[in-house]
Image (cartoon, rainbow, N blue to C red):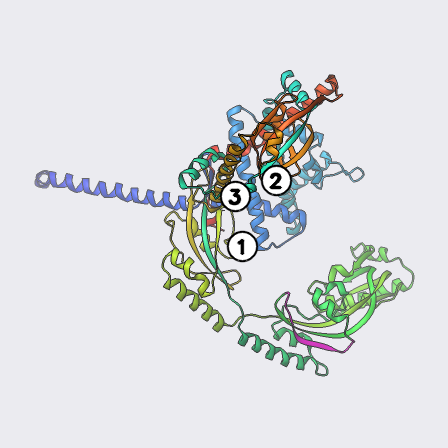
Amino acid sequence: MATLQKIRSKGALLILFVGLALFAFIAEEGVRSLSSSRAETHQRIGEVYGKSINIQEFNDLVDEYVSVVKFTSGTENFTDEQMQQLRDQVWQTYVQNALLEHEAAELGLTVTDAEMQEIIKTGQNPMLAQTPFRNQQTGAFDVEQLNQFLNQYKSIKDQPGQPAEAVEYYTQMYNYWKFIEKTIRQQTLTNKFQSLLSKLFIANPTSVQNLFDARNDEKEALLVSVPFSAVKEEVKADESELKAKYEEMKDLFRTNQPSRDIKFIDVPVQASKADRDEIIAELQEVATQMQAENADFANIIRKSGSIISYSALPVRRAALASDIAKEIDSMAVGTQKGPYLNIADNTQNIVRLIAKTTLPDSVQIRQIGIGGMDEAANKKTADSIMTALNAGVPFDSIAKKYNQTGEAQWITSSQYERATLDDNNLKFINTINAQAVGTTQQIKLGTGIAIVRVDDRKNMVEKYQVAVVKRPIDFSNETFNKTYNDFSQFVASNKTPEEIEANAVKAGYMVQQRSDIFSSEHNVAGLSATREAFRWIFNDDTKVGEISEIYTCGNNDHLLVVILTGKNDGKFSTLESEAVKAFVEEKVLADKKAGILQEKMEGCADIQAAAKLAGAQTDTIRHITFASPVFVPSVGASENALSGAVAKTAKGGFAKGVKGNAAVYAFQVINESKTDAKLDDAAKQNITAQINGANFRAASGFMRELYMKANVKDNRYLFY
């Protein structure tokens, strides 16, 4: 009771304590939630219609596509550039499908399972013909083969203890099929949407008649052209005029992703004279070693820094680097050239022609491989097989006994000449190239043995055994450090963009510019390894006018500094863009020149007076129709405005001051006629189809419109 009374006496304090504890708990949860939200935000690789996709989801899509490409092409490894292309394809497909699925959902368009079953059953979709499930005679998709595979896959999947190779193969094949099935479903939905869209653009009788008349009502005119270049007065565009013209033409500058304008200095790091002299001295020693009797070419070349490894295999001239092939044309066997400079690839080279021989370009062989036992047992089995073959037992029947086909196969030079061969493969190729047709022999490969019969040899060609040293002229660490320090000092001494531009040339650097670099691109200034520079350019905190740090790019052989000169985070490239500003300025100046010429032409009462204007050129243009732009030979331009002006002018009529793309025009219509064409039913059908097709092509930019509407965000540059 005393304890209870004590608690009651401290009630207010306890309430405050509990309140503070509760607040701390809520605050902690809030911070945790905020941290989680920020972490999730940082994982977003993109967004469509407000729905985000994170890096793991996107990587899963990439992995799916890469596995399909590997399975279908047999390629196991991809370069960084190839992987970037694959990621681009996956992103484009993801965005397109997301856009269409959103629109289709609003319209109630779907692709049902029943529709998919019918598509697969009929087998007419082109993607089905790319699958392995094809009729061997016709090459057409065979649904029965597909069903047979799916049953086999289920059986292998459900039964434990299956061979790992079989499980892996069937899993890859199944994943490939699921990808094809998903793609067909997406394609079918796209086709439905496009089909629905196409029905919105249907020609009517009036449009058919108008197009027929526009094509078949022809006029002939005397034409006077006064090109803009004839204006000798100085014309300039002020800021207000540029802004007004930009607003007038703004739709031309629509963009569907953020962009930036930059200026940059790219400094390539190049070998100094001392670096070059050191490389030459090293290679002169290598050349001496290669001339020694019984020289170990493989070891010498490996230590030389050559980018071409040594191979004792004789190869065709076409398999050699083009500059090396050119050199051996003038070399005798046993001679050597170099070190010498090849300017084309900036390398020092040594070439030694060891031997020249005539060998077959293609060899047809049959083989039986013996292995899996100890060396003595393998040899015993091989000898037994040779005895049977010598006794006349057919090669393929013996091969089948050892679970091999023994079928004939062609081995061509192109299959192995550019490959890296180990000792066993080198021995195998050299043996079959020298082996006579109709002979069979054993080739010992490690502990195993290949029994090989040569059935045929074709195209005897000259082959060369060559030892090549190709050493890039690389810069030293000292040269890199000096180049970096010099550039760093320049940047540190010029703290503003204006100072950098003013002093760059004197310091031996060149400021370049690039407008509208988009976040979907993968490099800056055409250089690889510019990811960090790219992130800086598109970072929200980077302000216009800021200068970046110095980045090491390319193959660690370029230095890069960037100045951010413009931002476009909206739907239009801005007038601050150098490219946009130059384009708008060109149009403003053209308008001003046109105005001057129109004013001069105003006083011309007839075509003869217009022809006397300074810079005027005359043409007689025939077959002018409203349907096609007039091509004016004297100025080399096609002019839509001129087509419209001539079409509405009667025979004998004179018009002047028509502003075109390249000139101001005056003309007099001297004749008008109609072609012999008739608007019969066939013509109506043809024109109707053309109008419908043209309208649909004009609307084919719907994907761009959907893209803009969806507020697509592409943050891939943050991750790759």
The Cα atoms of the two marked residues, 2 and 1, are separated by 34 Å
Q: Which residue is mark 1?
A: 526
Marks 2, 1: nearer the viewer:
1
Q: Earlier in the sequence, mark 2 or mark 3?
A: 2
Bounds of the magenta span?
A: 332-344
**Is 314 located above or below residue 111 in the figure?**
below
For the residues bearing labels 3 and 1, Cβ distance under 8 angstroms = no
Does residue 467 show up magenta in the picture? no
* Residue toward you, 576 or 304: 576
The Cα atoms of the two marked residues, 2 and 3, are separated by 65 Å
SS under mark 2 = helix
Q: Quadrant of residue 473?
A: bottom right
Q: Quadrant of the N terminus?
A: top left
Q: Residue furthest right?
A: 392
Q: Is residue 638 left or right of residue 313?
A: left
* Residue toward you, 531 or 676: 676
x and y, in percent, of residue 315 in the image: 76, 66
Tell me which amino acid carries mark 1.
Answer: Gly
x and y, in percent, of residue 54 in the image: 46, 43
Tell me which amino acid carries mark 3.
Answer: Lys
Q: Earlier in the sequence, mark 3 or mark 1?
A: 3
Residue 113 seen: no
Q: Earlier in the sequence, mark 2 or mark 1?
A: 2
Kindly identify which numbered label has been placed on residue 285: none
SS under mark 3 = loop
**Is 57 located above or below residue 368 in the figure?**
above
Marks 3, 1: nearer the viewer:
3
Q: Which residue is mark 3?
A: 232
Q: Which residue is mark 2?
A: 179
